[in-house]
């Protein structure tokens, strides 16, 4: 097994600790986890899907 991923929180996180996910770069995409349950399941998202998601967020398509 490789080294532990380097997790980070979004700069858009409010800092209140109420709703947050953490992401970590992976060799073929991005890992996503619930910051309140860091040892629970992780979601692995492929590079193209992650890029599409980030583009949609930046374009304001969610909210």
Image: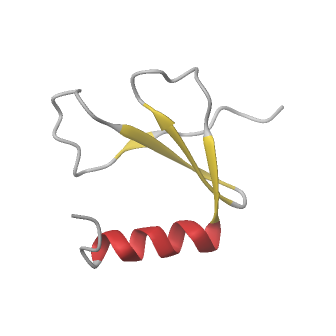
Residue 43 or 3: which is nearer the viewer? 43
Instruction: Please indicate whether residue 37 sits to the left or right of residue 40 in the image.
Output: left
* Percent coordinates x, y for residue 58 in the rendering: 29, 73
* Percent coordinates x, y for residue 35 in the rendering: 41, 29
Indicate the quadrant containing the C terminus: top left, top right, bottom left or bottom right.
Answer: bottom left
- Which residue occupies 61% across, 36% down? 42
Residue lying farthest right? Answer: 1
On screen, residue 13 above or below 59: above
- Which residue occupies 28% across, 79% down? 59
| Residue 53 figure quarter | bottom left
Color scheme of the displayed model: secondary structure
Residue lying farthest front? Answer: 63
- Which residue occupies 39% across, 39% down? 21
Number of residue marks: 0
| Residue 47 figure quarter | bottom right
* Percent coordinates x, y for residue 3 in the rendering: 71, 34
* Percent coordinates x, y for residue 8 in the rendering: 42, 42
Instruction: Please indicate whether residue 33 sits to the left or right of residue 35 in the image.
Output: right
Instruction: Please indicate whether residue 38 sits to the left or right of residue 57 in the image.
Output: right
Indicate the quadrant containing the N terminus: top left, top right, bottom left or bottom right.
Answer: top right
- Which residue occupies 45% across, 32% down? 34
């Amino acid at each position: 097994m490789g080294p532990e991923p380097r997790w980070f929180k979004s700069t858009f996180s409010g800092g209140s600790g109420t709703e947050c996910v953490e992401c970590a770069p992976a060799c073929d995409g991005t890992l996503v986890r619930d910051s309140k349950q860091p040892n629970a399941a992780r979601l692995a998202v492929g590079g193209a899907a992650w890029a599409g998601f980030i583009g949609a967020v930046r374009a304001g398509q969610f909210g």
